Image (spheres, helix red, strand yellow):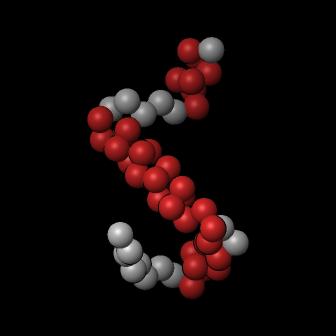
Amino acid sequence: MQITVEVSEELGQQLQQFQDRLQEIVERGLQELLSEQSGNFLDEKQIIALL
């Protein structure tokens, strides 16, 4: 599926260097957002406490 997204000039410049990994970037961001919604997201302090 192809999706067109408009981003700011600054974000576009940052993403340009990762254009071959854009799918991975979107997947990781989506996973993080879904984790936050489900309450399973751990911040750095929680992760360190588990270790």
- How many numbered marks have been drawn onto this rendered protein structure? 0
Using the image as rendered, state which of residue 25 and residue 8 is in the foreground: 25
- Name the residue at 41% across, 78% down: 5
In the image, is 30 to the left or to the right of 15?
left
Q: Residue 21: percent from the left, percent from the top?
A: 60, 62
Figure check: 11 above or below 47 = below
Q: In this view of the protein, can residue 14 be seen by the observer?
A: no
Looking at the image, which residue sits at the far front? 1
Figure check: 14 above or below 47 = below
Report the quarter where the N terminus lies.
bottom left
Q: Residue 26: percent from the left, percent from the top?
A: 47, 59
Q: In this view of the protein, can residue 19 be seen by the observer?
A: yes
Looking at the image, which residue sits at the far bottom? 9
- The image quadrant that residue 14 belongs to is bottom right
Figure check: 36 above or below 39 = below
In the image, is 38 to the left or to the right of 50?
left
- Name the residue at 44% across, 45% down: 32
Using the image as rendered, state which of residue 29 and residue 1 is in the foreground: 1
Looking at the image, which residue sits at the far left? 38
Q: Residue 6: percent from the left, percent from the top?
A: 43, 82
Using the image as rendered, state which of residue 43 and residue 27 is in the foreground: 27
- Name the residue at 52% across, 23% down: 46
Figure check: 14 above or below 34 = below
Report the quarter where the C terminus lies.
top right
In the image, is 18 to the left or to the right of 27?
right
Q: Residue 23: percent from the left, percent from the top?
A: 51, 61
- Name the residue at 56% across, 24% down: 47
